[in-house]
C-alpha cells in the first residue's frame, strides 16, 4: 500500500514540476504537408510547424498514432484542411487530448476550407452511398485557386490570434499568393490545347482541378467513396471509358494501379500516377511544386492521348511538337 | 531585309502573347487575385443554393444558421455495433453451446462533450451472458492542467494490451484465453456441463488518473483505484473454489480492499513505416489481505504500416506475458503465468490473415496448463463491417478438470476444434479516442 501511495506522490510531484511550454516560436500543427508549406511561407520563422500527414498516405487510411497526441497536446494552433478531410484520425485524436483551444470550433482551430465553394456535394446523405464526403469534395488543395483561398484563411486567422505580426506576415502573404497566382496563370497557359481532355480519377473529389483547367472528369475507379470497386462497377467503368472515348486514367499515387491497368488494357487508355499532396512524389516538396507537377503530368500525357483522339488534326500535332521542342530547349 | 522584318514582327507578337504570363509579380492586385481564385467553379454548373443549404443543414455544419433548429441538437452521438457469431465445434458434453448462431452482442454507444471540461461516454451491451448491461458509463475530465486526465465511473481500465479493446475491434473473434484467465472472471458453475464461461476482461467502477509525460516520445502513465478486480463474492466461481458459500465479503471496506492499477505506455516511431509500442501494467488487489492478488503484464506491439500503401498492406505483431501471484483465502501464494502472441497481416484492401498461439497456467492451480492455436481470415468490404472466419484448437482439459473438481461437478470436453464465423457492423456514429 505504501508503494502505491509513493507512486501516486511521485507522479504528482513530476507533474507539478513540469511548467508550461517554453515561450518562443508559435507551435503549429497542420493536418497536411500542403498546409504546412503555406504556413511556413506566410509566417516564416515566427512559427514551428509539424504536419500530421507526411503526404504519401491516403487520407482515409491515416493511422491515429500516439505521436499525434503529443503534438496536439503541446501546440498553440491547429490548422486543418476542413470539410471532414481529416475524419480518419483527427476527431479521435482531439477526443484524447486536453488542449481545449485547438478542439473543433475553438479559438485556435483554423479551418482552411472557409472560403471554398465545395464541389461534388452529395444529393443524399446515406451510408449506402459509401463513405461520403457529406460537405462536398474535401480535396480542396489540389487546385491553386483554392490554395490561394486557403492561404487567405491562414493569414486572416493568424493575424487575429497574433495581431502583433500583422505587418510582417501581410507582406509574406501577399508575395506568396502572388506566386501561386503566377503559377496558376502559367499552368493555364501550359494546358492550352488539352481543353476538354477526359480523365478518370480513382477517388471522388477531383472536379476542383478539372473545372480550373478545362478538363472533364468522366468517372471514378471507386464506385462509391471509400468502397473498393466491385466487378460490376469495373465492367461499367470499362464501358463508360470506351463510350466516352476517354483515354486517360490519372491515379493518385496512394492507390493501387491494378484495376486502372485492367481497365486501360480493355479500352486502350493510358494510366499515369499523379501526386495528391506535397511530398507524394519526387519534385513535390513545396505546394507550388506539387501543383506544377500535378498539372503538367496530366497535361503532358493529355497531349499524347489527344493526338490519338478523333477531331485532332495536323495543326494540333504541330503545336504539340513545337511545345515539346520548346520544353526540351 | 524582308526576312528581318518578319522576324521583328514575330518577336513582337511572341512578346505580346507571353505578356500575360510573364508579368511582374509586383503589378498584381491582391483583391483581383482573390476574386479570380474563387472563380473556377463559378463558371461551371453549381448546385442550387437551396440544395447546398439542405446538405449543410443535414451535416450540422451550416454556419448561416443563427439558432439551433431543433431541440435534439444537443443529444449525444449515437452508434450501435452488432456482432453476430456462428460457432461449431466437436466438443462433447456441451449441449447446444458447441454449435450455435448467436447475436453475441449489440453495443449501444453514446458519446458527448458535456461542457468545455468533461466528456461523457456510455456503452450499453445487449446479449451475451448478462442480458442488458451498462458495460461502461464514465465521465472524463480533460480540463485539468499538466496534461492530466481524470476518469470516473464504470469503465474498462487502461491496463494490459487488449483490456480496453471492445469485442468487435479485437484482432481475433474472442479475447485470448490467457487474457481471460488473468483479467477475466470465471462464472459460477451451475450445471454438470460447462465450458469455463467467463467475463473476458476487467471492467469495474472506480477512478483513473492519466498523465501524458512531457517527453519527445509518447509516454503515458495511468494510475487507478477500482472497487474490485477479482470477483470473490457469493455466486462466483471464486466462492466455489475456496468452498465458502458467501465467498469473501469484508464487513467494512478499508482502503486495502480496493484494487489499484498502474500502467505505463510508450510509443516509438522507429521510422515513417515502423513503430513499437510497449505496455507495462500492474494490478494490486486487496494488497494486505489473505485474498490479495498481484498481476503484472508486459506487452510489446510491433507495427509495419507503409504510409503510401497502408490501405493495402500492413502487419502487426503483438505479444503479452502475464504474471499472477494470488492468495486463495490462505497465506499460501499461488504463482502462475502465461502469454499469447499473434500476427495479423493485411493481404490487400479487403482481406487480412492472422495467427495466434498461447500458453497459460490456470490462475487457480499452477499445475494445470492450457494451449490455444488459431488462425483467422478477415474480409472487410468497407470501414463499417467485417466478416471473419476463425479456426482454432483448444486444449483446456486440465483447467476444466481442476475447476470441475473444485466445484464438485463433472467436467466437459476440454480438447476440441472450433470454427467461428463472426459478422460485425457499425451503425451510426463511431469515433474512437486513442485508447
Image: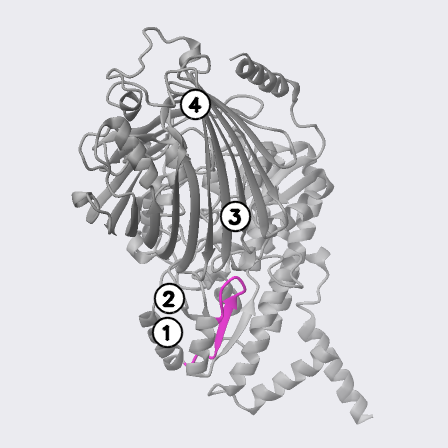
Drawn side of residue B201 relative to residue B314, left or right: left
Residue stretch rendered in magenta on the structure? A245-257
Secondary structure of residue under mark 2: loop
Distance, label 4 to label 1, CA atoms, is: 64 Å
* Camera-nearest label, 4 or 2: 4
Drawn side of residue A204 relative to residue B298, left or right: left
- To which residue does mark 2 refer? A229
Co-location on one chain, circles 4 and 1? no
x, y percent for residue B106: 25, 40
* Camera-nearest label, 3 or 4: 4
Secondary structure of residue under mark 4: strand
* Camera-nearest label, 2 or 1: 2
Pointer 1: residues within 10 angstroms few (<14), some, or many (20+)?
A: many
Q: Which mark is residue A81?
A: 3
Whichever of callouts 3 and 1 sits on the residue coming sooner in the sequence is 3
Q: Residue at x 65, y 42 (%)?
A: A49
- To which residue does mark 4 refer? B326
Distance, label 3 to label 4, CA atoms, is: 53 Å
Disc 4: which chain?
Answer: B
- To which residue does mark 1 refer? A237
Secondary structure of residue under mark 1: helix
* Camera-nearest label, 4 or 1: 4
Pointer 3: residues within 10 angstroms few (<14), some, or many (20+)?
A: many
Q: Residue at x 24, y 47 (%)?
A: B91
x, y percent for residue A257: 49, 70
Amino acid at each position: 500500500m505504501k508503494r502505491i501511495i509513493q507512486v501516486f506522490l511521485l507522479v504528482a510531484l513530476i507533474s507539478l514540476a513540469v511548467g508550461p511550454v517554453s515561450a518562443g516560436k508559435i507551435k503549429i500543427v497542420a493536418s497536411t504537408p500542403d498546409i504546412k508549406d503555406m504556413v511556413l511561407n506566410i509566417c516564416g520563422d515566427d512559427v514551428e510547424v509539424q504536419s500530421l500527414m507526411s503526404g504519401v498516405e491516403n487520407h482515409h487510411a491515416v493511422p491515429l498514432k500516439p505521436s499525434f497526441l503529443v503534438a496536439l497536446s503541446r501546440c498553440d494552433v491547429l490548422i486543418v484542411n476542413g470539410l471532414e478531410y481529416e475524419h480518419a484520425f483527427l476527431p479521435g485524436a482531439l477526443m484524447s487530448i486536453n488542449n481545449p483551444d485547438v478542439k473543433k470550433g475553438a479559438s485556435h482551430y483554423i479551418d482552411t476550407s472557409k472560403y471554398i465553394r465545395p464541389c461534388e456535394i452529395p444529393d443524399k446523405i446515406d451510408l449506402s452511398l459509401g463513405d461520403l464526403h457529406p460537405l462536398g469534395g474535401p480535396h480542396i488543395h489540389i487546385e491553386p485557386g483554392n490554395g490561394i483561398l486557403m492561404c487567405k484563411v491562414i493569414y486572416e486567422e493568424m493575424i487575429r490570434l497574433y495581431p502583433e505580426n500583422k505587418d510582417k506576415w501581410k507582406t509574406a502573404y501577399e508575395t506568396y499568393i502572388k506566386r501561386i497566382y503566377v503559377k496558376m496563370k502559367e499552368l493555364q497557359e501550359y494546358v492550352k490545347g488539352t481543353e476538354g481532355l477526359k480523365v478518370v480519377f480513382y477517388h471522388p473529389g477531383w472536379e476542383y482541378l478539372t473545372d480550373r483547367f478545362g478538363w472533364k472528369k468522366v468517372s471514378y475507379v471507386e464506385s462509391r467513396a471509400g468502397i473498393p470497386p466491385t466487378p460490376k462497377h469495373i465492367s461499367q467503368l470499362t464501358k463508360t471509358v470506351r463510350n466516352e472515348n476517354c483515354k486517360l486514367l490519372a491515379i493518385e499515387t496512394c492507390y493501387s494501379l491494378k484495376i486502372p491497368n485492367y481497365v486501360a488494357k480493355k479500352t486502350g487508355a493510358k494510366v499515369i500516377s499523379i501526386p495528391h499532396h506535397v511530398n507524394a512524389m519526387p519534385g513535390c516538396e513545396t505546394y507550388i511544386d506539387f501543383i506544377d507537377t500535378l498539372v503538367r503530368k496530366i497535361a503532358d500525357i493529355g497531349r499524347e492521348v489527344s493526338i490519338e483522339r478523333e477531331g485532332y488534326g495536323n495543326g494540333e500535332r504541330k503545336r504539340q511538337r513545337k511545345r515539346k521542342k520548346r520544353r526540351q530547349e | 531585309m524582308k526576312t528581318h522584318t518578319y522576324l521583328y514582327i514575330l518577336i513582337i507578337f511572341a512578346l505580346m502573347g507571353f505578356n500575360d504570363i510573364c508579368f511582374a509579380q509586383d503589378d498584381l492586385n491582391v483583391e483581383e487575385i482573390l476574386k479570380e481564385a474563387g472563380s473556377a467553379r463559378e463558371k461551371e454548373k453549381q448546385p442550387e443554393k437551396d440544395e447546398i443549404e439542405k446538405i449543410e443543414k443535414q451535416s450540422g455544419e451550416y454556419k448561416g444558421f443563427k439558432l439551433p433548429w431543433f431541440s435534439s441538437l444537443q443529444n449525444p452521438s449515437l452508434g450501435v455495433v452488432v456482432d453476430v457469431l456462428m460457432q461449431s465445434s466437436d466438443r462433447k458434453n456441451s449441449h447446444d453451446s458447441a454449435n450455435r448462431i448467436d447475436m453475441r452482442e449489440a453495443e449501444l454507444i453514446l458519446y458527448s462533450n458535456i461542457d468545455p471540461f468533461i466528456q461523457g461516454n456510455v456503452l450499453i451491451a445487449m446479449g451475451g451472458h448478462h442480458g442488458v448491461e451498462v458495460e461502461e458509463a464514465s465521465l472524463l475530465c480533460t480540463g485539468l492542467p499538466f496534461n492530466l486526465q481524470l476518469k470516473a465511473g464504470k469503465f474498462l481500465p487502461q491496463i494490459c494490451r487488449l483490456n480496453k479493446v471492445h469485442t468487435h475491434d479485437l484482432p481475433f473473434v474472442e479475447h485470448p484465453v490467457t487474457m481471460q484467465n488473468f483479467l477475466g472472471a470465471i462464472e459460477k458453475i451451475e450445471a454438470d456441463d460447462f465450458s469455463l464461461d467467463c467475463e473476458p476482461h476487467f471492467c469495474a467502477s472506480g477512478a483513473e488518473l492519466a498523465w501524458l509525460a512531457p517527453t519527445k516520445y509518447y509516454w503515458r502513465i495511468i494510475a487507478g483505484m477500482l472497487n474490485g478486480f477479482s470477483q470473490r463474492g457469493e455466486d462466483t466461481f471464486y466462492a466455489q473454489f475456496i468452498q465458502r458459500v458467501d465467498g469473501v465479503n469484508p464487513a467494512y471496506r478499508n482502503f486495502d480492499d480496493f484494487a489499484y492499477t498502474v500502467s505505463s505506455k510508450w510509443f516509438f516511431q522507429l521510422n515513417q513505416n515502423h513503430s513499437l509500442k510497449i505496455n507495462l501494467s500492474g494490478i494490486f488487489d486487496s494488497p494486505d489481505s489473505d485474498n490479495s492478488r498481484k498481476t503484472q503484464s508486459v506487452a510489446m506491439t510491433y507495427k509495419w504500416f507503409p504510409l503510401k500503401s497502408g490501405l493495402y498492406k500492413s502487419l502487426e505483431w503483438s505479444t503479452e506475458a502475464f504474471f499472477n501471484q494470488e492468495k486463495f483465502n490462505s497465506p499460501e501464494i499461488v504463482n502462475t503465468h502465461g502469454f499469447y502472441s499473434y500476427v495479423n497481416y493485411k493481404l490487400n484492401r479487403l482481406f487480412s490473415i492472422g495467427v495466434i498461439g498461447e500458453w497459460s497456467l490456470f490462475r487457480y492451480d499452477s499445475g494445470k496448463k492450457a494451449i490455444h492455436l488459431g488462425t483467422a481470415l478477415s474480409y472487410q468490404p468497407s470501414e463499417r463491417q467485417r466478416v471473419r472466419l476463425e479456426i482454432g484448437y483448444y486444449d483446456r482439459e486440465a483447467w476444466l478438470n481442476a475447476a470441475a473438481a473444485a466445484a464438485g461437478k463433472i467436467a466437459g470436453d476440454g480438447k476440441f476444434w472450433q470454427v467461428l464465423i463472426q459478422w460485425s457492423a457499425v451503425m451510426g456514429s463511431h469515433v474512437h479516442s486513442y485508447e
